Amino acid sequence: MGEFELIRRYFARKQPTSSSVLLGIGDDAALLQLPADEQLVVSVDTLVSGVHFLPDAPAERVAQRALGAAVSDLAAMGARPLWYTLALTLPEVSEGWLERFASALAQRSAELGIILVGGDTTRGPLSLSLTVHGAVRPGHALRRSGARAGDLILVSGTLGDSRAGLESLLHPQTAERASLDWLRERFYRPEPRLQLAERLASLAHSAVDISDGLLADLGHILQASQCGAELEVTALPLSQALLDFTPDVETREHWALTGGEDFELCLTLPEQHWEAARQIATALDVPLTPVGRILSAPTLCLLREGQPITLPSIASGYDHFRSQHGR
Amino acid sequence: MGEFELIRRYFARKQPTSSSVLLGIGDDAALLQLPADEQLVVSVDTLVSGVHFLPDAPAERVAQRALGAAVSDLAAMGARPLWYTLALTLPEVSEGWLERFASALAQRSAELGIILVGGDTTRGPLSLSLTVHGAVRPGHALRRSGARAGDLILVSGTLGDSRAGLESLLHPQTAERASLDWLRERFYRPEPRLQLAERLASLAHSAVDISDGLLADLGHILQASQCGAELEVTALPLSQALLDFTPDVETREHWALTGGEDFELCLTLPEQHWEAARQIATALDVPLTPVGRILSAPTLCLLREGQPITLPSIASGYDHFRSQHGR
């Protein structure tokens, strides 16, 4: 089977129709109609086997993880997903692997409301690169650069789960089965906070998705906004599954601050909008937790019950080229 | 140096400003303004070291080849280049390599009129994936599916040069230096036929860029248009450098038909538009050569001076998963 037959067979089928896709997979390029009076949001995300997922990860999980991580960048901008392209590099053609991968990708695409419009398949070490496209109304994009002194810092969902899920895959665990399954689901199947971001876009001053860890990603906001922050570590939202997984408080805080890849949102907004934001989050059934405040001084301070602390071995988040643990 | 610092240092700088780029590299995603009343054209292209370029290819050449190949897909649609994203996977951080790569990429981007708006850098075996974006007026996109019986088949430039350039890199050659340099330039630095395609868009019925070889890519037109064709092998446009490079007629024809990666255009248009097309090509100083005709019967016939022939060992073009020669 040739490369083109391969792409056509596995990816072109099952694509939903949309009035925005004038020409999908199968020509030299896709031809797309952006909704009238909207702006285009574009982001690219690469996942490499052995770096971003375990070499023996099931095909379905690779698809779910790749798409969730990529679409999370659209959520971080408050954008509505539209289309994506997939560059897939494979060491060999395994029809079974491709079948499972493509089916999971199609299902997750439908759930996230995004359509595959182009692909390239090449031979090489397993990796995926997705370029995702979304739309946002002019003036409604959430940027990193809008934080102001006095803003509350909010995070959605819970933190540290993805890191715990990875740990549970790397090392045998004694935690109860239900917690392990839930944590692994958090690692394997990121849930971009699309609706929450879109509805908070008019209230928030800045936003980022937590892919590198809260400290690193909040750091991106602080750098872009030229300000600082204080974070209260006892306020970090932790899941019951994470509490079940490890009794060690320091480990939990460390994972919540630096674990990364939870793909939750970190937003800042003025205090007077907190009640409205809280109601939106409640209506969507997504936890939204104040964890600190933006300061004008360009430093990031950690507090425990209001007192400044220094956590041991806090790195500045997850960084592929610094990482020593082989992820 | 961290990953983010690396991206920022090498790629964010030197980016030209454009009113279409509201927010470029540095946020979770780029924020872009599509020109009013235009449609979006999107294509993705991956290049893997050892598959699409030689493992020891200079950084400048990797950049030139990747961008030229990707933008050629926009030319094949008759689209005007706007923006692209780059997913770069590197085995290690070499500042010297990155510096040369980024400089060449910035220069070639400026020449082709396309702006880098997003990137992701990961650790792994060297590969690049570019997603290119362009604009086209409604109704003016060149598709593969519009060929009709009686259309002339035209190709731009000359064919087989890129394959000869690769051969000259793989095997020591006796051809004269100037020819070798020119052929290698054709291999390393594809020149997308953007202006020609844009100006022929209203005359042509169908188009494709020749990345997999004329036979394979014309085959894509025939499949999409549900028709056939006859090709006159003595009409194939060959460069003087290719003639200098190999005296073997069969080898030249084979490379011209199947060598691939010349990134020339193959278009079909009704005979009454040939004179207008010829004048446009002449004005742009790009060779444009009729090489055959579209037929209603769904077969592809090769002719030599009008007589049907079968060339030995003609494969259906370049295919990564079939290729045996290690490219």
Image (cartoon, coloured by chain):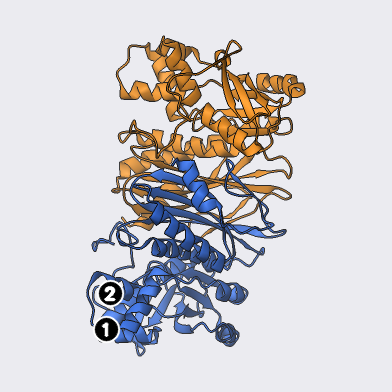
Chain colours: A blue, B orange
The verdict on a common chain for dots 1 and 2 is yes
Q: Earlier in the sequence, mark 1 or mark 2?
A: 2
Judged from this view, the residue extending furthest toward the bottom is A305
Q: Position of residue B288 (x, y in %)?
A: 62, 20
Left or right: B277 as drawn, with respect to A303: right
Residue designated by label 2:
A168
Viewer-nearest residue: B32 or B319:
B319
Mark 2 burial class by Cα count in 10 Å: few <14, some 14-19, many 20+: some
Q: Residue at x 27, y 85 (%)?
A: A249
Query: Contact, CB < 8 Å: mark 1 with mark 2?
Result: yes
Count of numbered marks: 2
Marks 1 and 2, how far apart at CA: 9 Å
Viewer-nearest residue: A138 or B161:
B161
Q: Is residue B211 visible?
A: yes
User: In which quadrant is the C terminus of chain B drawn?
Assistant: top left
| Labelled disc at residue B266 | none
Residue type at the position of mark 2: Ser
Left or right: B91 as drawn, with respect to A229: left
| Labelled disc at residue A175 | 1
Q: Position of residue B57 (x, y in %)?
A: 34, 33
